[in-house]
Amino acid sequence: MGKNIYTDRNQMELKQHGTVDFPVHIGIENIFEYDNKRFNCHWHKEVEIAFVLEGKMVYRVNETEYTISAGDALFVNANALHMGWSIENQPCSYHAITFDPSILAKENGKLRFQYIDSILDSGSFTSYVFRPDNNWQKAFLDEIRALDSLFLKKEDCYEMMVISGLLKAWSLFYRNTFQLLQQQNSPNKRLDKIKSILSFLHENYTSKITLDDISRSANISKSECSHFFKQYMHETPFEYLLRYRIAKSLPILLDENKNITEAALAVGFFNASYYTEIFKRIMGISPKTYKSNPNLLGNDND
């Protein structure tokens, strides 16, 4: 079974990034390690910077979609919804640098208010892409690239050097985007509705769900619900629901005490044959094949 991102009912990621004393985590991610070669929509209170090492992928933050390639980095602001997936089944590896902004400046202080919160609270900077063909962005990328080695070696005072590197990168970001910071955008109510819909689907996926149910959860019409959910998520609410049900069925399916029918019923399918049909469409193999060998994907030998 591949990796998954686990969230609460509001799609906030449950994983702790770093420790209480040093809330920074840097690790190598590979989009191929995730089920269906994509990680699910989620958010967290930390800032994230994805620095691409090899390949390319699609990374979506709120309503903006990026194609990022080797050498690029993407800034994902705190509390922004984000998801990513493989392009044309190609692999992509990247450093995921996640940190709590509180390590950069004391909360409620002047430095925090002027230089940190001005970006965190800006509607203009829910995300930002850095490319190596721009001089100041290249300098930013160099600072970010150096953090991985510091974090991996963990020599004496590495925490202070990581914070220093993040401060240098942040100051480059602020100084070169100050004018854009003045272009404050109003809160995006559509994203709140997306969160409401996702929360509803995640809470009720084991039950029968209609479009009426989904649209009522966000207090919008059925047509509006279908339109902007597909615009944001690149699939209909029911396509998302089916994929989510399949993902939730995987650990049940691998339980040697559970059969295929039990796995299907546990996640909201009302018969095993339809579950098998959807499973093969999404995963590329049958539930039977997956149950016997979860590492086999793409070749159904039944």
Image (spheres, grey):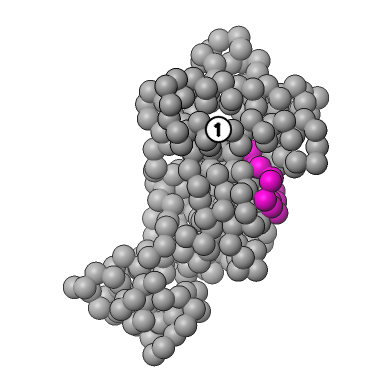
Q: In which quarter of the image is residue 187?
A: top right
Task: Identify whether 268 is placed above or below 274.
Answer: above
Q: Main secondary structure of the magenta part?
A: strand
Disc 1 designates what residue? 147
Residue 46 shows in the view? no
Image coords of residue 126 (percent x, y): 65, 37
Q: Which amino acid does label 1 sit on?
A: Leu
Q: Residues within 10 Å of mark 1 (few under 14, many from 20)?
A: many
Q: In this view, does 140 lie to the left or right of 163?
A: right
Residue at the far bottom: name it. Answer: 302
Residue at screen point 66% across, 15% down: 114
Whether the magenta-drawn stretch holds residue 112 is answered as no
Q: Quadrant of residue 16?
A: top left
Q: In which quarter of the image is residue 202?
A: bottom left
Q: Please state which of residues 139 and 247 is positioned toward the viewer in this rendering.
A: 139
Task: Identify whether 69 is placed above or below 15.
Answer: below
Please, what secondary structure does the residue beneath circle 1 have?
A: helix
Residue at the far left: name it. Answer: 257
Residue at screen point 56% across, 20% down: 164
The residue range painted magenta reads 64-76
Task: Identify whether 122 is placed above or below 49.
Answer: above
